[in-house]
Image (cartoon, helix red, strand yellow):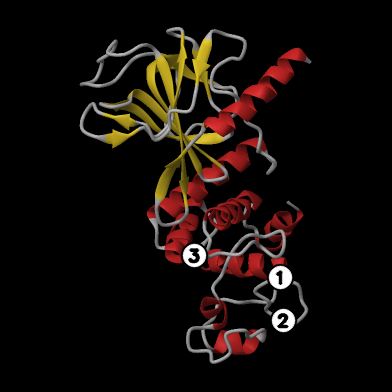
Amino acid sequence: MMLYKNIEAAMQIPWYYMAAIDQYEHSLRNSRRDLEKAKGAVGIHIEPERWSGMLNPNKNDHNPLTISFFDGLGMDGNGDHKADVNNDEDILFTIANHILFFGTDEDNFRIALWNYYKRDKAVGIIMGNASIFKKFGRIDLQENAFPVPVRTHYSYRSTWGFARGWGGRRSHEGTDIFADYGLPVRSTCYGIIEMKGWNKYGGWRIGIRDINNTYHYFAHLSGFAKDLRIGQVIEPGTVIGGVGSSGYGPPGTSGKFPPHLHYGMYRDNGFIEWSFDPTPHLRVWERKDLAKRRS
Protein backbone atom coordinates (compact mmCIF):
# COMPACT_ATOMS: atom_id res chain seq x y z
CA MET A 1 0.00 0.00 0.00
CA MET A 2 2.88 2.37 0.77
CA LEU A 3 4.26 1.88 -2.76
CA TYR A 4 0.85 2.61 -4.30
CA LYS A 5 0.40 5.69 -2.10
CA ASN A 6 3.83 7.00 -3.11
CA ILE A 7 2.84 6.79 -6.78
CA GLU A 8 -0.42 8.57 -5.99
CA ALA A 9 1.43 11.40 -4.21
CA ALA A 10 4.05 11.79 -6.93
CA MET A 11 1.97 11.29 -10.07
CA GLN A 12 -1.66 11.90 -9.02
CA ILE A 13 -2.73 8.40 -10.09
CA PRO A 14 -5.27 6.96 -7.61
CA TRP A 15 -3.62 4.26 -5.51
CA TYR A 16 -6.40 1.77 -6.26
CA TYR A 17 -5.57 1.88 -9.99
CA MET A 18 -1.99 0.80 -9.30
CA ALA A 19 -3.18 -1.82 -6.80
CA ALA A 20 -5.67 -3.17 -9.34
CA ILE A 21 -3.00 -3.68 -12.02
CA ASP A 22 -0.61 -5.26 -9.56
CA GLN A 23 -3.29 -7.61 -8.21
CA TYR A 24 -4.21 -8.73 -11.72
CA GLU A 25 -0.57 -9.46 -12.51
CA HIS A 26 -0.16 -11.42 -9.26
CA SER A 27 -3.14 -13.57 -10.29
CA LEU A 28 -1.49 -14.29 -13.64
CA ARG A 29 1.72 -15.41 -11.93
CA ASN A 30 -0.31 -17.73 -9.67
CA SER A 31 -2.11 -19.39 -12.60
CA ARG A 32 0.66 -19.73 -15.20
CA ARG A 33 3.75 -21.92 -15.21
CA ASP A 34 5.63 -19.75 -17.70
CA LEU A 35 5.79 -16.85 -15.22
CA GLU A 36 8.07 -17.12 -12.21
CA LYS A 37 7.07 -15.87 -8.78
CA ALA A 38 7.62 -12.17 -8.17
CA LYS A 39 11.02 -11.30 -6.69
CA GLY A 40 9.57 -8.43 -4.67
CA ALA A 41 6.22 -7.21 -3.40
CA VAL A 42 5.07 -6.04 -6.83
CA GLY A 43 3.79 -8.75 -9.18
CA ILE A 44 3.79 -6.80 -12.46
CA HIS A 45 5.73 -8.68 -15.14
CA ILE A 46 7.27 -6.72 -18.00
CA GLU A 47 9.09 -8.78 -20.65
CA PRO A 48 12.79 -7.90 -21.07
CA GLU A 49 12.23 -6.93 -24.72
CA ARG A 50 9.45 -4.57 -23.73
CA TRP A 51 11.44 -3.14 -20.82
CA SER A 52 14.69 -2.51 -22.69
CA GLY A 53 13.28 -1.95 -26.20
CA MET A 54 12.66 -4.42 -29.02
CA LEU A 55 15.79 -3.40 -30.96
CA ASN A 56 18.03 -3.01 -27.93
CA PRO A 57 20.87 -5.55 -28.24
CA ASN A 58 21.12 -5.64 -24.43
CA LYS A 59 17.92 -7.25 -23.15
CA ASN A 60 19.14 -6.80 -19.57
CA ASP A 61 19.84 -3.08 -19.99
CA HIS A 62 19.54 -1.01 -16.78
CA ASN A 63 20.57 2.32 -18.32
CA PRO A 64 17.53 4.62 -18.59
CA LEU A 65 19.15 6.59 -21.42
CA THR A 66 19.79 3.66 -23.76
CA ILE A 67 16.44 2.12 -22.84
CA SER A 68 14.74 5.36 -23.84
CA PHE A 69 16.80 5.51 -27.06
CA PHE A 70 15.44 2.09 -28.07
CA ASP A 71 11.86 3.06 -27.06
CA GLY A 72 11.83 0.68 -24.09
CA LEU A 73 9.38 1.18 -21.23
CA GLY A 74 11.86 0.83 -18.36
CA MET A 75 12.38 3.87 -16.11
CA ASP A 76 14.19 4.78 -12.89
CA GLY A 77 11.63 5.12 -10.12
CA ASN A 78 13.82 5.32 -7.02
CA GLY A 79 16.54 7.75 -8.14
CA ASP A 80 19.45 5.30 -8.27
CA HIS A 81 20.02 6.02 -12.00
CA LYS A 82 19.10 2.44 -12.91
CA ALA A 83 15.97 1.08 -14.56
CA ASP A 84 15.76 -2.35 -12.94
CA VAL A 85 12.98 -4.65 -14.15
CA ASN A 86 13.14 -6.45 -10.79
CA ASN A 87 12.87 -3.34 -8.62
CA ASP A 88 9.39 -2.64 -7.18
CA GLU A 89 9.65 1.15 -7.38
CA ASP A 90 11.03 1.11 -10.92
CA ILE A 91 8.27 -1.23 -12.09
CA LEU A 92 5.43 0.82 -10.59
CA PHE A 93 6.92 4.09 -11.84
CA THR A 94 7.24 2.63 -15.34
CA ILE A 95 3.61 1.50 -15.44
CA ALA A 96 2.45 4.78 -13.92
CA ASN A 97 4.32 6.71 -16.61
CA HIS A 98 2.53 4.64 -19.27
CA ILE A 99 -0.81 5.56 -17.67
CA LEU A 100 0.09 9.26 -17.48
CA PHE A 101 0.68 9.34 -21.22
CA PHE A 102 -3.08 8.76 -21.65
CA GLY A 103 -4.48 10.42 -18.52
CA THR A 104 -5.60 9.50 -15.02
CA ASP A 105 -9.39 9.76 -15.34
CA GLU A 106 -11.35 6.52 -15.64
CA ASP A 107 -11.94 6.63 -19.39
CA ASN A 108 -8.30 7.30 -20.21
CA PHE A 109 -7.17 4.71 -17.67
CA ARG A 110 -9.22 2.15 -19.59
CA ILE A 111 -7.55 3.26 -22.83
CA ALA A 112 -4.11 2.96 -21.22
CA LEU A 113 -4.92 -0.56 -20.04
CA TRP A 114 -6.13 -1.67 -23.45
CA ASN A 115 -3.05 -0.20 -25.10
CA TYR A 116 -0.86 -2.17 -22.71
CA TYR A 117 -2.71 -5.52 -22.55
CA LYS A 118 -4.59 -5.55 -25.89
CA ARG A 119 -7.33 -7.62 -24.19
CA ASP A 120 -10.80 -6.38 -23.29
CA LYS A 121 -11.19 -8.93 -20.51
CA ALA A 122 -7.98 -7.79 -18.83
CA VAL A 123 -9.29 -4.22 -18.86
CA GLY A 124 -12.59 -5.34 -17.30
CA ILE A 125 -10.93 -7.40 -14.59
CA ILE A 126 -8.54 -4.61 -13.60
CA MET A 127 -11.34 -2.04 -13.51
CA GLY A 128 -13.28 -4.43 -11.27
CA ASN A 129 -10.29 -4.76 -8.94
CA ALA A 130 -10.03 -0.97 -8.78
CA SER A 131 -13.70 -0.65 -7.83
CA ILE A 132 -13.28 -3.22 -5.04
CA PHE A 133 -10.16 -1.60 -3.60
CA LYS A 134 -11.71 1.86 -3.83
CA LYS A 135 -14.86 0.84 -1.95
CA PHE A 136 -13.12 -0.90 0.93
CA GLY A 137 -10.06 1.34 1.08
CA ARG A 138 -7.61 -1.49 1.68
CA ILE A 139 -5.89 -4.36 -0.12
CA ASP A 140 -6.18 -7.21 2.41
CA LEU A 141 -9.44 -8.63 1.05
CA GLN A 142 -8.86 -12.39 1.13
CA GLU A 143 -11.70 -13.34 3.51
CA ASN A 144 -14.28 -15.87 2.26
CA ALA A 145 -17.65 -17.22 3.37
CA PHE A 146 -19.54 -20.47 2.83
CA PRO A 147 -22.25 -19.85 0.18
CA VAL A 148 -25.17 -20.80 2.45
CA PRO A 149 -25.56 -20.22 6.21
CA VAL A 150 -23.85 -22.94 8.22
CA ARG A 151 -25.84 -24.97 10.75
CA THR A 152 -28.80 -25.03 8.39
CA HIS A 153 -30.23 -27.95 6.43
CA TYR A 154 -27.90 -28.62 3.48
CA SER A 155 -25.59 -31.30 2.11
CA TYR A 156 -22.93 -31.53 -0.59
CA ARG A 157 -20.12 -33.63 -1.98
CA SER A 158 -17.72 -33.23 -4.88
CA THR A 159 -19.60 -33.59 -8.17
CA TRP A 160 -17.16 -31.61 -10.28
CA GLY A 161 -16.36 -33.33 -13.57
CA PHE A 162 -19.38 -35.65 -13.46
CA ALA A 163 -21.21 -36.20 -16.74
CA ARG A 164 -24.34 -34.21 -17.52
CA GLY A 165 -26.82 -35.14 -20.25
CA TRP A 166 -29.44 -32.38 -20.52
CA GLY A 167 -28.74 -30.24 -23.58
CA GLY A 168 -26.01 -32.59 -24.81
CA ARG A 169 -23.06 -34.37 -23.26
CA ARG A 170 -21.06 -32.06 -21.02
CA SER A 171 -19.07 -32.04 -17.82
CA HIS A 172 -20.37 -30.72 -14.49
CA GLU A 173 -18.35 -27.60 -13.71
CA GLY A 174 -19.13 -27.18 -10.03
CA THR A 175 -20.39 -28.64 -6.75
CA ASP A 176 -24.09 -29.04 -5.96
CA ILE A 177 -25.20 -27.95 -2.48
CA PHE A 178 -28.66 -29.43 -1.83
CA ALA A 179 -30.70 -27.33 0.57
CA ASP A 180 -34.22 -26.16 1.40
CA TYR A 181 -35.92 -24.00 -1.22
CA GLY A 182 -35.32 -20.31 -0.55
CA LEU A 183 -32.36 -20.78 1.81
CA PRO A 184 -30.23 -17.62 1.47
CA VAL A 185 -27.31 -17.82 -0.95
CA ARG A 186 -24.38 -15.61 -0.02
CA SER A 187 -21.36 -14.17 -1.76
CA THR A 188 -18.28 -16.24 -1.00
CA CYS A 189 -15.82 -13.37 -1.50
CA TYR A 190 -15.05 -9.71 -1.88
CA GLY A 191 -15.83 -9.14 -5.51
CA ILE A 192 -17.79 -7.45 -8.25
CA ILE A 193 -20.92 -8.80 -9.94
CA GLU A 194 -20.01 -9.50 -13.56
CA MET A 195 -23.15 -11.32 -14.65
CA LYS A 196 -26.76 -11.66 -13.54
CA GLY A 197 -29.70 -13.16 -15.39
CA TRP A 198 -31.05 -16.32 -16.99
CA ASN A 199 -29.24 -19.23 -18.59
CA LYS A 200 -31.09 -22.27 -19.96
CA TYR A 201 -28.71 -24.58 -18.09
CA GLY A 202 -28.17 -22.61 -14.88
CA GLY A 203 -31.51 -20.87 -14.60
CA TRP A 204 -31.34 -17.66 -12.58
CA ARG A 205 -27.63 -17.22 -11.96
CA ILE A 206 -25.03 -14.75 -10.77
CA GLY A 207 -21.30 -14.49 -11.51
CA ILE A 208 -18.90 -12.69 -9.15
CA ARG A 209 -15.18 -12.09 -9.81
CA ASP A 210 -12.86 -11.65 -6.84
CA ILE A 211 -9.54 -9.79 -6.65
CA ASN A 212 -7.62 -13.04 -7.24
CA ASN A 213 -9.20 -13.22 -10.71
CA THR A 214 -11.36 -16.18 -9.67
CA TYR A 215 -14.90 -16.22 -11.06
CA HIS A 216 -17.55 -17.53 -8.62
CA TYR A 217 -20.69 -18.90 -10.30
CA PHE A 218 -24.03 -19.37 -8.47
CA ALA A 219 -26.81 -21.11 -10.42
CA HIS A 220 -30.36 -22.54 -10.14
CA LEU A 221 -31.39 -19.66 -7.84
CA SER A 222 -35.01 -19.10 -6.84
CA GLY A 223 -34.47 -15.38 -7.43
CA PHE A 224 -32.14 -12.49 -6.73
CA ALA A 225 -31.70 -10.24 -3.71
CA LYS A 226 -33.43 -6.87 -4.08
CA ASP A 227 -31.55 -4.15 -6.00
CA LEU A 228 -28.65 -6.45 -6.88
CA ARG A 229 -27.03 -5.19 -10.09
CA ILE A 230 -24.17 -5.88 -12.47
CA GLY A 231 -21.11 -3.87 -11.48
CA GLN A 232 -22.03 -3.89 -7.79
CA VAL A 233 -19.17 -4.46 -5.33
CA ILE A 234 -20.02 -6.89 -2.54
CA GLU A 235 -18.34 -8.63 0.39
CA PRO A 236 -18.34 -12.17 1.83
CA GLY A 237 -21.70 -13.10 3.35
CA THR A 238 -23.77 -10.63 1.29
CA VAL A 239 -27.08 -12.31 0.41
CA ILE A 240 -27.39 -12.47 -3.40
CA GLY A 241 -30.41 -14.77 -3.81
CA GLY A 242 -32.01 -17.98 -2.64
CA VAL A 243 -31.62 -21.70 -3.30
CA GLY A 244 -33.96 -22.85 -6.05
CA SER A 245 -34.51 -25.30 -8.89
CA SER A 246 -34.51 -22.96 -11.89
CA GLY A 247 -33.10 -23.91 -15.27
CA TYR A 248 -33.21 -26.55 -18.03
CA GLY A 249 -35.52 -24.52 -20.22
CA PRO A 250 -36.70 -21.04 -21.22
CA PRO A 251 -36.81 -18.18 -18.67
CA GLY A 252 -38.89 -19.08 -15.64
CA THR A 253 -38.50 -22.88 -15.97
CA SER A 254 -38.27 -24.46 -12.52
CA GLY A 255 -38.83 -27.74 -10.70
CA LYS A 256 -37.08 -30.16 -13.06
CA PHE A 257 -34.74 -31.25 -10.24
CA PRO A 258 -34.54 -30.93 -6.44
CA PRO A 259 -33.66 -27.47 -5.11
CA HIS A 260 -29.94 -26.92 -4.84
CA LEU A 261 -27.20 -24.37 -5.42
CA HIS A 262 -24.76 -25.09 -8.21
CA TYR A 263 -21.51 -23.42 -7.16
CA GLY A 264 -18.61 -23.19 -9.59
CA MET A 265 -15.16 -21.59 -9.62
CA TYR A 266 -13.17 -20.54 -12.69
CA ARG A 267 -9.68 -19.16 -13.10
CA ASP A 268 -8.36 -16.86 -15.83
CA ASN A 269 -4.66 -16.81 -16.81
CA GLY A 270 -4.71 -13.91 -19.25
CA PHE A 271 -5.50 -16.14 -22.24
CA ILE A 272 -8.23 -18.60 -21.28
CA GLU A 273 -10.58 -19.34 -18.38
CA TRP A 274 -11.17 -22.83 -16.98
CA SER A 275 -13.18 -24.57 -14.28
CA PHE A 276 -11.69 -26.29 -11.22
CA ASP A 277 -13.16 -28.27 -8.33
CA PRO A 278 -14.51 -25.87 -5.67
CA THR A 279 -15.13 -28.57 -3.04
CA PRO A 280 -11.79 -28.19 -1.16
CA HIS A 281 -12.43 -24.46 -0.83
CA LEU A 282 -15.99 -25.08 0.35
CA ARG A 283 -14.71 -27.41 3.07
CA VAL A 284 -12.28 -24.77 4.35
CA TRP A 285 -14.85 -21.96 4.30
CA GLU A 286 -17.43 -24.16 6.02
CA ARG A 287 -15.01 -25.00 8.86
CA LYS A 288 -14.11 -21.34 9.34
CA ASP A 289 -17.76 -20.25 9.41
CA LEU A 290 -18.58 -22.98 11.91
CA ALA A 291 -15.68 -21.83 14.10
CA LYS A 292 -17.01 -18.26 14.02
CA ARG A 293 -20.44 -19.49 15.09
CA ARG A 294 -18.94 -21.35 18.06
CA SER A 295 -16.94 -18.33 19.16
Helix or strand or loop: what does disc 1 sit on? loop
What residue is drawn where x is 72% and y is 54%? 5
Label placed on residue 82: 2
Q: Is residue 26 visible?
A: yes
Q: How many marks?
A: 3
Q: Nearer the viewer, residue 126 or 283?
A: 283
Residue 167 locus on image (x, y percent) = 21, 29
Q: Name the foreground residue: 116 vs 199.
A: 199
Residue type at the position of mark 3: Phe
As rendered, which of 165 and 219 lies closer to the eye? 165
Assess disc 3: are there few (<14), some (14-19) or many (≥20) residues with their C-alpha within 10 Å of its C-alpha: some
Q: Which mark is residue 40?
A: none
Residue at 47% x, 57% y: name it: 108
For the residues labelled 2 and 1, the Cα–Cα distance comes to 10 Å
Is 181 drawn above or below residue 291 in the view shown? Answer: above
Label 2: how many Cα within 10 Å (few below 14, some 14–19, many 20+) = some
Q: Mark 1 sits on what residue?
A: 87
Residue beneath disc 3: 102
